[in-house]
Image: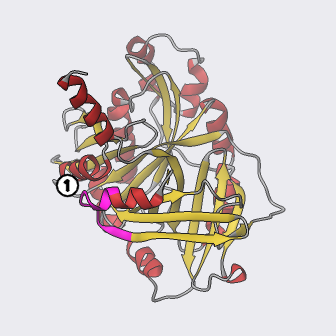
Amino acid sequence: MSSTTDTATNAAQETDFLTLNGTDYIELYVGNAKQSAHYYKTAFGFQGLAYAGPETGVKDRVSYVLVQDKVRLMLTTSLKSDSEISEHHKKHGDGVKVLALWVDDAYDAYEQTIKRGGKSYMEPKTITDDHGEVCMSGIYTYGETVHLFVERKNYKGAFMPGFEKWESTYNPEPVGLKYIDHCVGNVDWNQMNPWVKFYEDVMGFKNILSFDDEDISTEYSALMSKVMSNGNGYIKFPINEPAEGKKKSQIEEYLDFYEGEGVQHIAIATDNIIETVTALQNRGVEFLNIPGSYYETILDRVGEIDEDLAPLKELGILIDRDEEGYLLQIFTKPVEDRPTMFFEIIQRKGAQSFGKGNFKALFEAIEREQANRGNL
């Protein structure tokens, strides 16, 4: 074997030191988990999966776990006013605390990331019950957000030890949400590149796409973004930072109201965005309004698509194309009172990009909402 091949092999092995199988779950700290769970069931079609609280031996918090296909959301509320969870919620409002990643070996994932500079959040531990064992460990990322590494190959229960199956008589139909496509983080001024380096050095990710303030700008505001992806592409974390503009950017608004860095939005994939968004709108989910003029020339830009344009226009679904195909995407308004976290619904028809051609229309729509709030 040549030295060049040796080098390439070693580089590949080094890059794959942290094998991630996908997103295990996303945990939000919220003000009222019971009511939040009802909202996500009613509005987004999630099903009850598991529950932890005083009835299961957990005395300081309650957690409801919801599922739809491969998407798992955990909603957690503290039962004490002086807890870390309560302090987090007091500062940030409802928001993402944990981006949990599914791994084969949680102990090794911890060792690999800590020795490369990761800051410990949870030392490796194994928790057990009658259904088996789950191994977990964790590190901090931007703001107060953390990555937990979850190893569950030896577990057969509903979710993990400490939880019991959540039985409910209220189970609205799913809306076709399939899996987590990507999660976007907002970081402070001049912090995008340091966090890009963190994901490269500590977790072995690659920067697969970059957008500067020329790509993502309007008359009033701008931002910059870099997309980080792990080796197999199962985990993608775009990272945004503000850029100079005439007025306050959406990233600055987020940082002001979240009072720090955190997860801006969760993008969830669907196989039929028209059906999914129709169902979501019928259940009261609010989406950003896109002007009808966007659709007058859209097919000139993206070319032929399989879908009829009329329902896409009616629903406000955006379209973009790259070398590998096209995508359809739409963004909700913030799903809490603070203008912070929101959701994206995305259907990929071959495209692997993130809708660069839609940035201007999208951010103008966000600016209209900002102006309504008096924050532009």
* Nearer to the camera, 214 or 161: 161
Quadrant (top left/top right/bottom left/bottom right) for the N terminus: top left
Q: Residue at x 43, y 50 (%)?
A: 265
Give the residue type at disc 1.
Gln
Where does the magenta region start and end? Answer: 112-121
Tell me, yes or no, if residue 42 can be seen here: yes
Label 1 belongs to which residue? Answer: 191
Q: Position of residue 114 (x, y in %)?
A: 30, 62
- Label 1's element? loop
Asked whether residue 340 is in view, the answer is: no
Q: In the shown orientation, is residue 207 left or right of residue 334? A: left
Q: Which residue is drawn at 24% across and 60% down?
A: 117
Task: Decide: is 105 above or below 5.
Answer: below
- Seen in the picture, residue 1 relative to 80 is either above or below; the reply is above
Q: Is residue 250 magenta?
A: no
Splitting the image into 4 quarters, where does residue 216 fall? Answer: top left
Tell me how the rendering is colored: secondary structure
Mark 1 nearby-residue class (10 Å; few <14, some 14–19, many ≥20): some
Q: Residue at x 24, y 53 (%)?
A: 198
Q: Measured along the vertical axis of the image, is residue 5 above or below residue 211?
A: above
Q: How many labels does the image show?
A: 1
Residue 23 is situated, as x and y percent measured from the top left of the image, at 51, 49
Indicate the position of residue 285 as horizontal and vertical percent values. 60, 49
For the point 60% across and 32% down, the residue is 273
* Residue 118 part of the magenta segment: yes
Which quarter of the figure has residue 146?
Answer: bottom left
Foreground pick, 153 / 282: 153
Who is closer to the viewer here, 325 or 11?
Answer: 11
Q: In this view, does 251 lie above or below 289?
A: below
